[in-house]
Amino acid sequence: MSYCVYTAEYIGSPNHEAIYIETDPMAAESADRGRRYHVTGTILQGMVYESKGSLDPDHEATHVPGTKKRIGTVAIGDLTRFEEECCRAVPPPRPQVTLGGKRLYSGTPLYRCGDWMRDVLVLAFEKGIFRAG
């Protein structure tokens, strides 16, 4: 048995991006139907990894309509492996700018939540934890 894996965007500047795994599609609309895997924080202070129960993104007030996209599946038994070998293996974005907006690491592109998410997804597919479809 497996769970569906999605990416989703939430309102922000730029939009916040996260991985959503639907673990209980039959749960009430107002209940947690899955887990959100993402980093929170800012490029000013740095970010931290977070995994938490989550409503279906389509029922979240801050979800950007049309951005929930199914990218694959994960076996139920691989959720812990996904979190340990992928989410915790990719470092969250560090502080990258000063309060005045000056870059701390000139010549290095900004690394935001969406970049972290894409790196985690690549790792999950490379390790065979996520399967396309």
Image: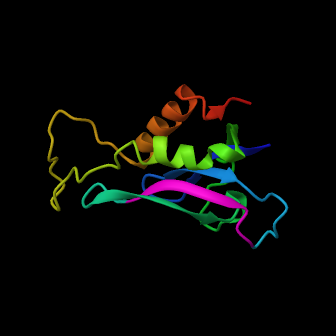
Reply above or below: 20 against 115.
Answer: below
Question: Is residue 8 left or right of 49 when viewed as pictured?
Answer: right
In the image as oriented, which residue stretches furthest toward the right? 26
Question: Is residue 83 left or right of 26 when viewed as pictured?
Answer: left
Residue closer to the observer: 103 or 120: 120
Reply above or below: 70 against 11.
Answer: above
Residue 37, magenta (yes or no)? yes
In the image as oriented, which residue stretches furthest toward the bottom? 30
Residue drawn at point x = 20 percent, y = 52 percent: 97
* Residue 62 spot, x, y in % from top left: 59, 64
Figure disc tally: 0
Residue closer to the observer: 97 or 30: 30
Tell me where the magenta segment starts and ends, as one range: 31-40
Q: Quadrant of the C terminus?
A: top right
Reply above or below: 46 against 55.
Answer: above
Residue closer to the observer: 23 or 117: 23
Question: Is residue 64 left or right of 17 when viewed as pictured?
Answer: right
Residue drawn at point x = 29 percent, y = 54 percent: 43
* Residue 99 spot, x, y in % from top left: 17, 62
**Which picture quadrant has residue 74?**
top right
Residue 121, magenta (yes or no)? no
Residue closer to the observer: 48 or 14: 48
Is the stretch drawn in magenta largely helix, strand or loop? strand
Q: Quadrant of the N terminus?
A: top right
In the image as oriented, which residue stretches furthest toward the top? 126
Residue drawn at point x = 81 percent, y = 66 percent: 27
* Residue 40 spot, x, y in % from top left: 41, 60
Residue drawn at point x = 21 percent, y = 35 percent: 108
